[in-house]
Every structure is written in structure tokens, then in C-alpha cells.
Amino acid sequence: MRAITLLMASIAIVFGTAAAPADTYPSHPITLMVGFPPGGPTDALARLLASGMQSSLGQPVVVETVAGASGTVASGRVVHAKPDGYTIGIGNWSSHVGAPAVGRIDYDVQKDLQPIALLAASPLWILGKNGIPPTTAKDLVAWLKARSGPTTFGTVGAGSAGHVCGLSFAEKTGANFQYVPYHGAGPAITDLLGGQIDLACLETSATLPYVQAHKFKAFAVMSPQRWAKAPDVPTMVESGAPGLTITFWHGLWTTAGTKAPVVDRLAGAVRSALATPAIATRLADLGQVVFPADQENPTALAAYQKAEIAKWWPVIKAAGIKSGD
């Protein structure tokens, strides 16, 4: 009998130890890595998400910004963190689709990161400084074709969604662009406002206030349909460029090897945060479209990212984009 009791106690200790991480998680603050500078859409979404997640997790979610290499520096921090769920990272099309196709990173963007959940998406649009003469997308295309020299076009890193947007735009319209890379949307917005660059393809939610204030011009959205927050701005498809679409989406990841109960706890916190009325209203005001609750989970994010990589990596590699372009 004593032997059986000891055996049962040993089993309880083993299983109790295995369950402990999920039962006690989180017991201290969580770090949310952001790979883009303050002022851009990823930073804004991260801070809203962090405030909402900590309510259900019972621990602070601390935003840490490590900008550079189209977000892959911050993602690398997540890859190399301890797989305990205390380091998570927000990413987007640029950091988790485009940049890994062009840069030298020391990790596999699909195998070395554990998906948590899809978050939100919004269109990109073609923006121009106020000093250029065109007022419509069709006028812009005609003006670009008539120019003898290159037009400066801001991008948020090599292989970013905005870079691929510019390449696709040039291919379909015959424009001649001189690409100007930035570490994030914030600096690109600053230079567009100041007239240092002519055009950029940036995310709508981060730039809508400037368009509404007539600080620069919005020529066309890159989504298949018009954007509800700016219904008067046509799509590029309507403006004579069939197939010229790209969506800027965000997701949340942690370190590969993190236990499933911990990942599920994080995914649950995401769903709770995005369903919070104040956060949902703020995201809607920004023009972010939150993914349905049944896609705010690891499986949906993994499948979505895989499909985007299959669609865009051949395009990026065919264009010969390299890190530093």
C-alpha cells in the first residue's frame, strides 16, 4: 500500500509540474515586442492590444519598441526568447511576409515562431505630397508618365508592403520611381508632410487624419473595394490598374515551443481585448477591420500567413528585391 501511495504521489508531482506553467501563467509582466517606430499603425494597434490584454491576463503587458529591418529585429527577439509566453511580438505583412523574403535573418519565419492570433487589417493607399499637381489617380498616372526623371517614393523597408505596392504600381503604370527607405511609417509620414518625398504607399488607418486635414493627397486605395472610412477615394482597379491590390494585416506571435495552454491563454486575451467596446470603437475609428473572433487563434494565423507567403514570395523574388534596396 505504501508503495502505491508513493507511486501516486510521484505521478501527482510529475503532472502537477507539467501543469504548473499553464496554471500559474502569467505570474509577472509580459513584454510585447514592436518592430516599428512610434506613430505608425503597428505601434498604435500594439498599445491598444496591450491595454486590453492585461485586463484579462491580470499582469501588465509592456510594449517594447525595437525598430529596424522591417520589423525582423523585434521578431528575432521573440524567436530567441525563452518559450514561456512572456515575450510576444506583433507583426504585419512587412515583417512576416515581405522582409523574410529579401533579408538575411537567422530564423524561419514560419517554423521558429508560434502563431497566437490574427488581429486586424486595413488597406494601403497611394499618397502624394500637396506640392504635386495631380488631383486624381488617373491624373497621377498621366503626370508620372510625362516626367523625364524619377519620382521619389517612400517605402517602409525593403520588401515591405509599401515597397511591393510601389513596384506593382510602377509595373502597371510605367512610372519611374526612386525608392526612399524608412525604418517605419512614422518617419515616412513626416517626410511626406514636409515634402521631402513625392509619393508613398502607406497604411490607411495611420494616415487618415492627415488626409482628412488635407496635409497630403490620397489618390487611390489598394483594396479590391473602396474603403468605408474614405468612400470618395477610388481603388486602383477602378483607376485603370486591374489586379493592383494588397492588404496590410497584423498578427501576434510568441516563441516556438511555448506550451499550448499558454498560447491558448494569450489567444483568449486577444479575443477579449478586441471585443472590448472601447478598443473596438477606437480600431474602427482608425479604419482597422478586426478579423472575426473565430480567426483570432493560432491555426487561423498560421494558415493565413502561409497563404500570403505562397502568393507574394514569388513576386518579391522575381523583382530581385534585396535587403537594403
Image (cartoon, rainbow, N blue to C red):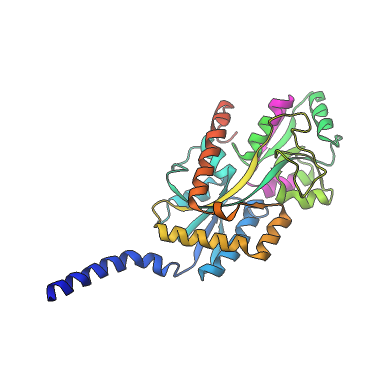
Q: Which residues are magenta?
A: 169-191
At a point 55% along the width and 35% down the height, the residue shown is 323
Judging depth in this view, the residue of 298 and 214 nearest the camera is 298
Measuring from the top left, give residue 145's x and y in whole percent: 79, 24
* 31, 283: nearer the viewer: 283
For residue 81, which quarter of the picture? bottom left
Considering the image in quadrants, where does the C terminus appear? top right
Q: Is residue 36 left or right of residue 135?
A: left
Residue 186 falls inside the magenta stretch: yes
Residue at screen point 62% across, 62% down: 275
Q: Residue at x 45, y 67 (%)?
A: 26
Does the magenta segment cover residue 14? no
From the top left corner, tell me how far across and down residue 283 is, in percent.
68, 57
Nearer to the camera, 318 or 58: 58
Where, quadrant-wise, is the N terminus in this rendering? bottom left
**Residue 224 at x, y percent in the picture:** 70, 38
In x, y percent, where is residue 75?
50, 49
Nearer-the-camera pick, 211 or 198:
211
- Residue 321 appears in the picture as rendered: no
Q: Is residue 169 above or below residue 90?
A: above
Q: Is residue 74 visible?
A: yes
